[in-house]
Amino acid sequence: MKPSISTLQSLAAVFAVILIMTCFSALADKAEKHEYVLQNPVTADYLRKNLRKQLPRLVLNRANEKILNKSLKNDPLIQNIYQTIKLHAERVLEKDLISLDIPDNPNAQRNQLGISRDFLYRINMLAMVYRIEKDQRMLRRINDEVMAACNFPTWNPRHFLDVGEMSLAIALAIDWTAGDLPKSTITMAQQALIEKGIKPSWPENGSTPGWVNNTNNWNQVCNAGMIAASIAIAELDPELAAKTIHRSIDGMNNALREYGPDGAYPEGPIYWGYGTQFSVVTAAMFESAFGTVFGLKDFPGFLESAVYAMLTISPTNRLYNYADCNEEAEGYGNFTLSWFATKTGNRTFLNEAYFLLPPAEMKNFSRLAAAGLVWTAQFREKNSQPLPTAWKGGGANPIVVFTGDKDDPNGYYFGGKGGRGTVNHGNMDGGSFIFELNGVRWSVDLGNQSYGPLERAGFNLWGRCQECDRWKLLTKNNFGHSTLSVNSQLHVVDGMADIVGFKDGLIPEATIDLTPTFAGQLKSAYRRFVKEDPASLLIEDDIEISKETKIITWQLMTTAEVELVEGGAILTMDGKRLRVENLSHAGIQMSVISLYPAPLQLDKQIEGLKRLELQIPAWTIGDGRTKIRVRLTGN
């Protein structure tokens, strides 16, 4: 029996609706998958038409050089930075020439990165003073340094960070001297940039080096070096220069995506300082050489990362040192933040107090300080905004920060985090936190430890599988962090802990879903942090156990003296006190585990380190659920 015309019409209508819905769905999927990407028009023809011909053109050009010279006449802050650069340039003149013959440092890794960094520092100081004053001593020393570095057998391409920083330095040396070096030196430098810099980045087997497209700081540093080198040799070999710049711009997208959505850099504040300074110098080179940043400034989360960087510095001027990060704030980050100040007009990002220190007291001075001087001189205040006192940053390694305002007498600082161990430079620290009050860091993160001794001992520091060596270290595993542990087991290395709730205001709070962190150990776990008042922090863990759960351990890492008292503990340091109140499990006494010396010989040894614990056996949890509530209260 044939279908009727009306039936066919009905079927056609249904198919039409399905087709329309499918098309809309496909468009929606396409829109959802659309990602911001850098503009990338670079070809050899583009270079010929658009690359500025006149030197200098890397960070410096004739236009911003006029701004710099004017600032050097009437701006005390710029004058002071320049005097500091001059001081360092004079110190370079007192050193031996750069060489590969340096004393072996047991804490250093076995590569040439320290040499490349020293060379980048030397060129920044010498070349800026020469640029401003035409001091012939500086020019002669630049010439000698460049010839010495170009005569190195290689720039160590096996560890391409070494090549990246060296290439940037050589490119700046010949660019900022703008033809004043002997022609033979310029030729040697350009050939070295090609043979020891760019060509090793193009393996003969046609493969693409991992750093080109990866998501960590190597991407930012190595691509910056290749871009600088390519601009420096563009007239000599435009095809090689164009294809290298084009590849780098495409690759940079992968590292820049890590700043989204809010600016929280997954590798922590130290690596924010390292990687971001090279993204910033890349933007400055693009702008000076091409008149555009190819969209870098507007990459989602990138400008916002300045807020992140400043909020990871506590009132005691120590970093929230999660990931492979030390507590000491790096001075070089101040010049990176100056770029953000210049691009936003927000004076909050300009560290005037640091830049106005006497030159001899400006510690941790950046090896890119001369480049930083250029963009710092361009700062003009437009729309300054204070830092928030409660902030959340999402992404691959999310964090939350609560602080007091700028006049806070208690110096309140809390930093908590989610994340997972498999993130770049990550640790098993989901749910961990640091807490400062009254100038004391009561809950600590153990921070980084030197890579060199571990690598020399044959320790596989960089493997991130569940059973890898990395998690044997107290600095890396959950037993060395102020978080939860279950059954004395490691966290699930790829279990992502997300911040699922956040509220700002006078009583800010944040909630982290730790359930994936404890897959196979608990049914669910949620950790909530609340700043109840200007001198206290509440930590609340809502837990549902599983049949695998045997014991839950609440942990706080501290270097304070600990006195166990009824209902909790009293921490004492520097004449200050912090009460740790067990609000939920009155029948269970806290305990203290001494971790000095640390369990392993290869562990970082931290004097006075202890782990304050509250252990809750699963058999005491009658209905399968428990809520651990602990309050930290200062004087």
Image (cartoon, rainbow, N blue to C red):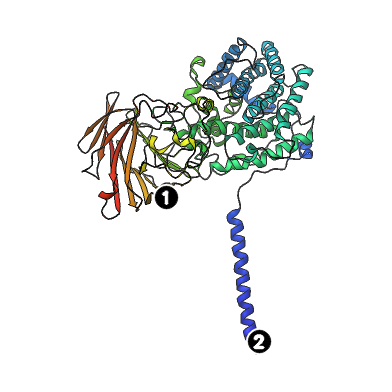
Residue positioned 64% across, 78% down in the render: 12
Q: Secondary structure at mark 1?
A: loop
How far apart are the alpha carbons under marks 1 and 2? Answer: 58 Å
Residue 528 visible in rendering: yes
Which is more foreground, mark 1 or mark 2? 1
Q: Which residue is mark 2?
A: 5
Q: Quadrant of residue 226?
A: top right
Dot placed on the residue nearer the N-terminal end, 1 or 2 = 2
Residue sitting farthest toward the bottom: 1
SS type, badge 2: helix
Q: Depth check: 202 or 3 in front?
A: 202
Which residue, given by chain and number where applicable, does mark 1 sit on? 519
Q: Position of residue 550 (x, y in %)?
A: 32, 47
Left or right, 577 with respect to 401, comes to left
Front-most of residues 104 and 357: 104
Q: What's under tag 2, amino acid-wise?
A: Ile
Residue 422 or residue 274, whichever sits in front: 422
Q: Residues within 10 Å of mark 2 (few under 14, many from 20)?
A: few
The quarter in which the C terminus is drawn is top left
Image coordinates of residue 298 in percent, x first then y, are: 59, 42
> Residue type at mark 1?
Ala
Question: Which quadrant is the N terminus positioned in?
Answer: bottom right
**Residue 399 falls in image quadrant:** top left
Q: Are marks 1 and 2 in contact (CB under 8 Å)?
A: no
Which residue: 53% across, 44% down?
260
Category of crowding for the residue at label 1, using alpha-carbon neighbours closer than 10 angstroms: few (below 14), some (14–19), many (at least 20): some
Quadrant of the rendered structure where residue 25 is? bottom right
Q: Is residue 311 visible?
A: no
Residue 481 location (% of width, % of height) = 39, 36
